[in-house]
Structures are given as structure tokens and as C-alpha cells.
Amino acid sequence: MKAINVGIIGISGYTGLELVKMVIEHPIFQLTYCANTEGATTLGELHPALAGVCDLAVEKVDLDRAASLCTLVFLALPHKAAMNTAKGLLERNVRVVDLSADYRLNQTNYEAFYCEHEDIENLAHAVYSIPELHGKVAEGARLIANPGCHVTASLMALAPFLDKIDLNAPIFIDSKTGVSGAGKSPSATVHYVSVNDNINCYNIIKHRHATEIEQHASSFCGGDVKVTFIPSLVPMTRGMLACVYATLKSECDPLLEMESFYTSKPFVRVRKAPPHTKMTSGTNFADVYAARHGNALVAMCAIDNLMRGASSQAMVNANIMMGLDETLGIPKIAYVP
């Protein structure tokens, strides 16, 4: 099959690095363009782990040049910056997989938690895709809104039970994430002395990802889903474990429900015991488990926040977008020990 030229804008961060690592090993995608706000460097200089592996020039963002070199561009940019870049690329007939939050929510919800949306036209046709939950909706899309880590893990734990739980009873989600989820820029919150030997909850109840979970869970089941979302920062580099607590309204075997729901899904493993984050580190796997105590349900999902929670899920969505096998170029062997 003919190679598909792809680019990455926002190459400096952790998710940009993970995208590079996958693209250079991909059998169809060919990395032809990398950019950030400064340029004037190479991948090997920017990310020393890539020295001697891939020394492609890193350029200052130029949308005309990106369009001349690429069929598809991944955006690993902050919100607001992403929508302006995506709009320009789409005008130049370049397909876009956006890793930011800019196209994940409807306009009302987005503007309540982020900023005024500046690309309403493309927001209307952006495709939100967790492949196991949304099937092949990304196939042929021009713009994919790639879900983030907390939402991916939470929805994958919750989705198999949306028709089995009481939506009028409280649904609690406790989601723990590694420090890389905060991004590469240093801050007091992620300073070593703040994180080491410590665990802390942040933005409890009011976290903006709660709205994203509610919007897409409600869309998925056709009901009104409300959650109480509690994220925590834990002292590890990568990984995420989301635990969902809900009330069952009917009899079921939770593990059998998960096994049935995720049958033949290559990147979901239903575990017989609670998963560890290390089981999925460096991969696109989502390891899920569920149990009940009377009518109390506990469902959980472990992922790599940088991979399934961002870059590898974006690559799966890009594969689907371009009509390829979704597993092409996707890492399956975890970083253990």
C-alpha cells in the first residue's frame, strides 16, 4: 500500500514524543513534518532518546508547508491553540487528529469550562471516538476529537453497565493519574518535593472532565448520566486507574457483562482480578475489571495515560480514519518491570 504522509504539530511534549515513536515504526504512515512554536532544531536534539533513531528537522509551525507535505496531521497542542491550527489545516484539505479538548464537547459545555470556541463550523462535524465504544465512526472523518485519559478510562469502566445501573443513584468516579498527565511544563504542583511520597486530589467535583464524561455517557446510553468525579495525582510517571462506583438496578455478573461487551476488542483485556497500571504501561491496552457487593457495583479500568489516554488512541483513530487495520503500528508489550 502507498505510504501516507503525516505530520505532528506540538512535537515538544510527552504526547508528541509518543506519536513520533509510533509513526516511525508504522508500516504505512511516514513522518514528513514536525513542528513546534520555535523550530530550528531536530528531533534528536529536542528529544535525546531519538538521537540516531530519527533526526528529522523540527520546524516552526507553517500551515502551508504542513499542507504541502502531509495528508494527515496530529495536533498535540493546548486547547485554544489547537482549534485555530485545526481550522487552518482543514481549510487546506488536511485531515486532523486533535489531542486537545477543543472538539470533544458541545459548544455550551466547552465554553463553560475552557474559553470561547472559535471554530464552531468544524466543531459541528468533529468525530469523537473511543473505538471500542463508538465503532468505526472515525472512518473517513476529516477531524477527530481524540478523548483524553481520565475520560477514556472512566467511560471504558462505566459503559458496559449503563443499562444495568440506576442512573438516579449517585455515580462516583475515583481516577488516579501519573504526573506525566500534567504535561511537560514545570509547576509547583508537579515539583518533585510536592509529588514524591504524596497523593493529592485536585479539582474535586468541579473538574472539567466530569462534564465530558457526562456528555458522552449520556449520548451513549440515551439517558441523563451525572457523575461525581474525583481525580488524584499519584507519585508515578505514567499510568491511570479509574474506579467507578454505582448502584445496580438488576441482577448481573459484572465480569460476564464486561466480557460480553468487549468481545473481540483487540485492545481491551478483561481481567479476573483488579488490574495494575504497570500491566498497560507503554501500550494501548485498557485492562478492565468489575465486581459487585449486593447491588453495589465497582468497575475499573487501567490505562497508560500518555498512550491509551492520548497518543496511541490517536494513532488507532488515525488508522480507522484512513481505512487501515486499527492495530497497525500500535504497541502491545508493556514496560515491565
Image: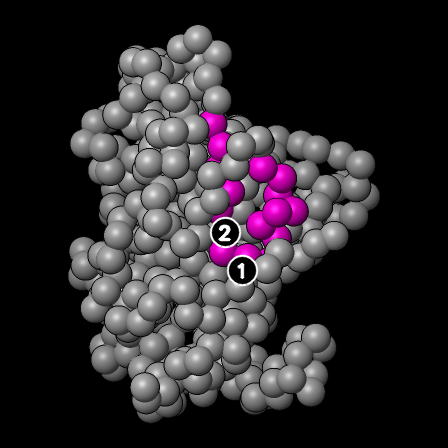
Q: Where does label 2 land, which residue? A: 285
Residue 83 vertical placement versus 288 (above, below): below
Residue 23 painted magenta: no
Specify the farthest residue to the top. 294
Q: State how many labels appear.
A: 2
Q: Quadrant of the N terminus?
A: bottom left
In the image, taking residue 35 as reference, residue 254 lies left or right, namely: left
The answer, for residue 337, to whether it is visible in the render is yes
Q: Magenta segment, which residues?
A: 275-290
Mark 2 residue crowding within 10 angstroms, few (<14) / some (14–19) / many (20+): many
Regarding mark 2 in the picture, which secondary structure is present there?
Answer: loop
Q: Do the CB atoms of the residues marked 1 and 2 lie less than 8 Å apart?
A: yes
Q: Where does label 1 land, which residue? A: 332
x then y, percent, for residue 86: 32, 69
In the image, taking residue 63 as reference, residue 125 lies left or right, namely: left
Residue 277 painted magenta: yes
Tell me what residue is drawn at x 41 percent, y 54 percent.
266
Residue 236 vertical placement versus 318 (above, below): above
x then y, percent, for residue 215: 29, 37
Q: CA distance from mark 1 to mark 2?
A: 7 Å
